[in-house]
Image (cartoon, coloured by chain):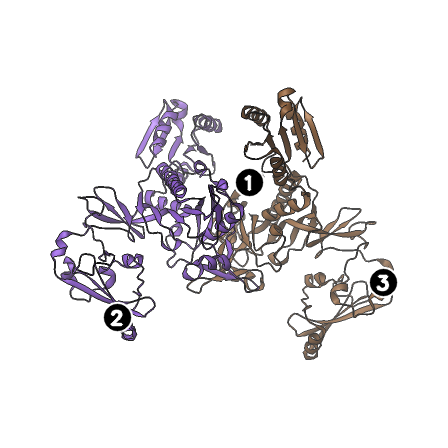
Chain colours: A purple, B brown
Amino acid sequence: MSSLGASKLSLSSITTETLWKRSGRYSENSELLRLKDRKKSGFLLSPTHEEEITALVAGIANSYKDLPIRLYQIGRKYRDERRPRKGLLRAKEFLMKDLYTFDYAYEQGLGTYESVRKAYKNLFDELRIPYLVAEADSGSIGGDLSHEYHFASPSGEDIVWSCNSCGYTANEELVEKRVNPERRVNTGVLAFTTISADHNTAIRIIIPAPDSLSKDHVSTPRIHDYVNLHALNRAGIDIDSSLEPQALSVLLAKTKRSVTIHDRSLPQESNILPLDLTVTRPGDSCSRCASGELDSQPAIEVGHTFHLGTRYSAPLNALVTTPENTEVLMQMGCHGIGVSRLIGAIASLLHDERGLNWPRIIAPFEAVIIMTPQVSEEDGIALYDMLRSGGVDVVLDDRASKSVGWKLKDADLIGYSVVLVLGKSWKTSGSVEVQCRRLGYRENVKEGLEKTVCELLDRL
Amino acid sequence: MSSLGASKLSLSSITTETLWKRSGRYSENSELLRLKDRKKSGFLLSPTHEEEITALVAGIANSYKDLPIRLYQIGRKYRDERRPRKGLLRAKEFLMKDLYTFDYAYEQGLGTYESVRKAYKNLFDELRIPYLVAEADSGSIGGDLSHEYHFASPSGEDIVWSCNSCGYTANEELVEKRVNPERRVNTGVLAFTTISADHNTAIRIIIPAPDSLSKDHVSTPRIHDYVNLHALNRAGIDIDSSLEPQALSVLLAKTKRSVTIHDRSLPQESNILPLDLTVTRPGDSCSRCASGELDSQPAIEVGHTFHLGTRYSAPLNALVTTPENTEVLMQMGCHGIGVSRLIGAIASLLHDERGLNWPRIIAPFEAVIIMTPQVSEEDGIALYDMLRSGGVDVVLDDRASKSVGWKLKDADLIGYSVVLVLGKSWKTSGSVEVQCRRLGYRENVKEGLEKTVCELLDRL
C-alpha cells in the first residue's frame, strides 16, 4: 500500500442504512448483518466500505488537483455467510485489507488499476506460493474490470478455469470457451423451460445437445448441469432456478409472456447478441488462443481488484472539476485482500501432520533457537545475537520448564520457517542442528551458520 | 501492558448469546447491540469480553503453574448508548484497550490488581494531564474492588467527589460522607414512599430533613434529590424510581408488603445495617479524615480497573488445581482504557481556538518543520536529520503547493507539540523560529536547537 502512496484510515464497522439505500446495495444484499439501536434506527455491519469512503472523499476532494486519492484500511468486515465453515476461510467476521482509489478520468483510473495489480502481484509473489489471477465478473460490487487472486486448493469453494496453452485464466462466472466447430454439425438440441425471476415471463432456452447427455438419460436433465446460468445473468436475464419442477409448472401456467433464447451455435435471428449458453467442460477449447484446452480446479479466493468506474460516485454524487473546469464523477476502484482468509488458506496449503509451515514473509519469526539443558543461557543469547545481527528474525525458546521434545513439537506446530537446536555439539564443535521441515532439510552446521539459514529462508 | 507481561490477542466482536446467558449478563444489559443471522441465531456485539476470555482461559489453564495469565487486546467495542454524543466521547462503536488477568488465589489476584494500578498510573502520568483516581462501584461487570480514572472536565458526564484535605476520591455511586453530628439534633424528618423494582413491596424511606428543604417547599420534594439511590441499590434494595406519582399510587395500592428504611442518623432497630441514605452535598464532611470537606466536579472516565474475583470463573466453571492439588475457581481482573474516548477527552481538554494540542507521548509527531520558499529542500532535510538524530520524532512539511501561512494553520490544527519555521534566518544566521503554543513559547533559536526542542517536549 505504501508503494501506491496510499494512506491508512479506519472507518467504523457500524454503518447506517441510509448510504446503502442511496447506492442501491441495501435491499439486494442478503449477506448483510443488520441491527437496530434502541431508537429502532437501522444499521448494518459493513462487509465493505465503498459507500462510506465515497461520501468521505466527496467531501474533501473538489478538483482534479486533489486526486489521485488512495485510502486503505485493515480491519474487520462482516457477512451473514450462508455457510460459515473451515475456520478462517469463511466466517461471519473476518479481517480484510481494503483499498479505495479515486481518479478524475477513466484513463487515470485504469492507470491506477494497473498500479494496484502490480502491487498485488508483488505482494502475492512474496508469499512464494503459486497463485492464479483470474478474470472475474464484478458481481454486486459493480464496475467493469476485475481480477481475482486465487490459491488452487481442494479446500476451495471457487472454480478457476485455465488454458493449458496461453495462460488465460478466468473464474467460473466469466470463463469463455470457443465454439467447437464440430458441434455445429450436431443437429440435436436440448431445451429447458424456466421462468424469469419476477415470475412474469416463461423462458425457453435451447442449446445443442451435449455428447454426454446419453449417459444421464435415465433422469430428467437439470438446467444447472447444462446451461451456463452466469452467461444468462450477465446478459441481464434473471431466472428463478430455485424452483422444484412442480412449483415451476404452476407458475409457468400463469405467465403471459414467453421468450426463447438460443445458444450462439444454433441458427437464430441475426440481431440478437450471441450468447454462449452451454456450460464449460474440461477439454473445451480456449477462447483466447488457437490450440489450448480449458481445465478447471477448485480454488480459494484471497484477493480481488475492481475498477468501479462511477458505480458509487454517481449515486453518491462524488464530483470533481477537471483541468477544463467542467465537473465529472470520480473514477473509483476498490481492491481487497482477505487477510484472515489468506492466513487460513496458507495454513491449509502448507501444513502437514506435524503442524503449520509459514512462508518466511508471514512467519511469526523466521527462525527459532531451541535451547537444550546442555547449553547455558549465555550460549543461547550468543547465537541469538549472531543471527539477529545477520538479519534473521529469530526468537529464543528458553522455557526451562519444558523438555526439548516438547519444544521441538511446539516449534513444528507453530511453523517457524527454520528451527535451530542448540545442544551439546555447540560446546564441543561449535555446531548447531538446523532443521527446515518444508524443504526436508536437517544438518549439523558448523561453518557459515547465518549463510545457511539465510539460504534456506530465501527458498521459503 | 508489556510491563505487566501481558500477551496481546484479538477476539471476535460478534459473540453468541449463549455465553452471556451463562454469565447472567445477557438479559440485564440494555446496552447490548443484538443481531440475528440468517438462521435466526442470536448474536451480540461485545461491549467487553469477560465471557469469551474466561471460556478461552478455562480451556488452556489447568494448574496454578499455568498462572498468572494476562491477556489484552486493543479493539472495537459496541454499546447501544442511550445518548451517543460529543464525537469520540460517547459513541456506539469505540476503541478500547481491555486487559484480563487470571490468578489462582485471592492474594495473587490482589497483587495483580496492584500491578495493574501501577501500570495505569505510569500510563496516565506519561500524558502529563492531571487525572483523578476514584474509588468506584463495580456495577454490572461484578466484583469487589474497582477504581476509575478520570479527567476533570466540564464536558464530563460523570461526577467525581474529592476531599480537600486527605485526597479521598470516589465516584458519585460510591462516595461516603461522615454523619454531621449537628444533624442528629435536628428532629425533623423527610419521608418518601416508593416501590420495589418488582412492584411487590412498598418501601418507606425516612431521612433527616435537610436544611435546604424549606427553600423548595412550594413543590413536592423528589426522591432523587434527597435520597442516595446508589446506597439503596448497593444494599440490595432495588426500587423503581421511574414512576410518575399517579402510577406509583396505583401500584402501591396493590402491594401486600411494606418495609421502612431509616437513614443511619435516625433512631432505628439495632440489628439493621446502618445505611447512609442522604445525598452528598458539597461541603459535607469527608468519611476518611477528621477535617476535610467533600466537593464534586464533572469528569470524563477514561479508564477502569476491576478486581472481579470469581464473578465470571464461577458461572463459566474456570478451574485450576492449587499447589495442594485441590480445584479452585480462578481469580480474575478486568482493566480497561477507553482509547478513542481518551483521544476525545484530551482533544477537548487541550484544544484552543486554533486547533488541537497533543501531549508529546501521543502526538502524531512531536515536532513539525515548516519549510518556507526561502530555503531549499536540502536545508529542510539537514534540519530534519539533525533533529531525528537528536531523538526528536519530527516530520517535514515540504508541501510546495501550500503557502507558509496555510501550513502554519494546518500545524496548529493538527496539534504537533512543537513547530519549527525554517525561513530566511536559517541562511543568514543559522536560526530557526521555534513555537510551542501550549507553553506560549516563540523564539528564534540559533544555538542548541535540539536542546531547546527537547526541553520544551519534556514539559508536554
Identity, as a three-letter code, of the amino acid under mark 2: Pro
Q: Which residue is mark 3?
A: B211
**Dot 1 amino acid type:** Gly
Residue on which the image places disc 1: B5
Let me know if marks 1 and 3 both belong to one chain: yes
Q: Are marks 1 and 3 in contact (CB under 8 Å)?
A: no
Q: Is residue B122 above or below residue A25?
A: above
Residue drawn at the location 78% of the way across and 68% of the way down: B221
Marks 1 and 3, how far apart in space?
54 Å
Which percent across, then down, holds residue A236? 32, 59
User: Which chain does the numbered disc 3 sit on?
Assistant: B
Element at label 1: loop
- Location of residue A128 (image quadrant): top left
Q: Residues within 10 Å of mark 2 (few under 14, many from 20)?
A: few
Q: Chain of mark 1?
A: B
Tell me: B430 left or right of A175: right
Q: Position of residue B87 (x, y in %)?
A: 61, 51
Residue that carries the numbered disc 2 in the rendered image:
A245
Q: Looking at this view, is B405 or B96 the one in front? A: B405
Residue A144 x/y as whole percent: 35, 50
